[in-house]
Amino acid sequence: LTLEAAKGFYVVHRERPFYQSLAESMSAGPIVAAVLEGAGAIAAYRELMGATDPKKAAPGTIRADLAVSLEQNTVHGSDSPQSAAFEIPYFFSALDLSARG
């Protein structure tokens, strides 16, 4: 992910003080993008990820166990269907995706 692409992905945070460092962190190395689907997928994945701030994340969550800092919190997940609608096409075309069912 290039720095410019990371800035575009996190454009919603452009006025926040952590925006630049977050974009730099996301573009510092390889990423793995995935789309999860299912009833309650967003809430379930957010529970698995833990709080955005790893210092506040529950033990056993991805961020509590693996994150380095708030900006380098290891994992990202959409917080709503609206966010997912923006974020998924950022990495995947319609040809890449196939709905279950």
Image (cartoon, rainbow, N blue to C red):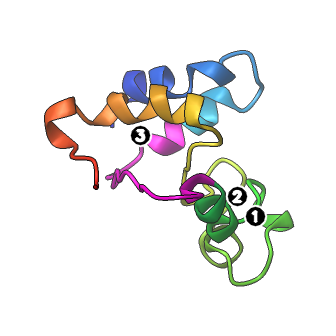
Which residue was labeled with disc 1? Answer: 54
Percent coordinates x, y for residue 74 in the rendering: 55, 60
CB contact under 8 Å: marks 3 and 1: no
Percent coordinates x, y for residue 57 in the rendering: 79, 68
**Distance CA(mark 3)–CA(mark 1):** 20 Å
Q: Name the residue furthest right.
A: 56
Which residue was labeled with disc 3? Answer: 27
Percent coordinates x, y for residue 61 in the rendering: 67, 76
Which of the 4 image quadrants contains residue 64?
Answer: bottom right
Q: Callout 1: helix, strand or loop?
A: helix
* Amino acid, disc 1: Pro
Give the label, 3 or 1, closer to the camera. 1
Q: Residue at x 35, y 29 (%)?
A: 90
From which residue to which does the magenta span run? 24-42
Counting residues from the start of the chain, the first of labels 3 and 2 encountered is: 3
Which residue was labeled with disc 2? Answer: 69
* Image quarter hosting the N terminus: top left
Count neighbours of disc 1 (C-alpha within 10 A) and say few if under 14, some if 14 to 19, many if 20 or more: many
**Distance CA(mark 2)–CA(mark 1):** 7 Å
**Distance CA(mark 3)–CA(mark 2):** 15 Å
Count neighbours of disc 2 (C-alpha within 10 A) and say few if under 14, some if 14 to 19, many if 20 or more: some
Q: Nearer the viewer, residue 65 or 98?
A: 98
The verdict on residue 79 being magenta is no
Q: Nearer the viewer, residue 65 or 97?
A: 97
Which of the 4 image quadrants contains residue 93?
Answer: top left
Counting residues from the start of the chain, the first of labels 3 and 1 encountered is: 3
* Amino acid, disc 2: Ser
CB contact under 8 Å: marks 2 and 1: yes
